[in-house]
Image: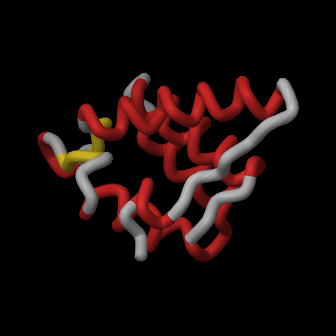
Amino acid sequence: MRLDAEQQGWLARGLTALHTGDEKRFEDSLWLGFGDSWKPLKSALVRNGYLLNGDGNALTLAERGEQLLLKLAREDASNKSGSIAGLSDSTLGTR
């Protein structure tokens, strides 16, 4: 799965929501950005260590998820200056 700039934005919104403890907004952001593919993406993020299941199975950002959020923010900034690299399967571990 390769993410385009718009999908990167939705993922960043979702991770930001999760960073602030709003799991519902995280899931809504994934659904808006990825449609029916949001659940497999969420599972891949957990499976590959970006998200952790906390108490009562509440999701939290792992250190790796925090790093991904920072990477997305940097790529968003570079996109605004005219360049974008995109995220790949190797970044998300979804292949």
- Front residue of 45/32: it is 45
Check the image and report above or below for 41 versus 83. below
Q: Position of residue 75 (x, y in %)?
A: 65, 34
Q: How is the image coloured?
A: secondary structure
Total numbered badges shown on the rendered structure: 0
Q: Residue at x 76, y 49 (%)?
A: 6
Q: Residue at x 37, y 30 (%)?
A: 66
Q: Position of residue 95 (x, y in %)?
A: 41, 76
Screen quadrant of the N terminus: bottom right
**Which of the 4 image quarters holds residue 73?**
top right
Q: Residue at x 58, y 46 (%)?
A: 11
Furthest-right residue in view? Answer: 82
Q: Residue at x 65, y 64 (%)?
A: 34
- Front residue of 69/10: it is 69
- Front residue of 40/23: it is 40
- Front residue of 15/3: it is 3
Q: Position of residue 5 (x, y in %)?
A: 75, 48
Check the image and report above or below for 95 versus 92. below
Q: Tell me: 59 left or right of 54.
A: right
Furthest-left residue in view? Answer: 55
**Which of the 4 image quarters holds residue 78?**
top right
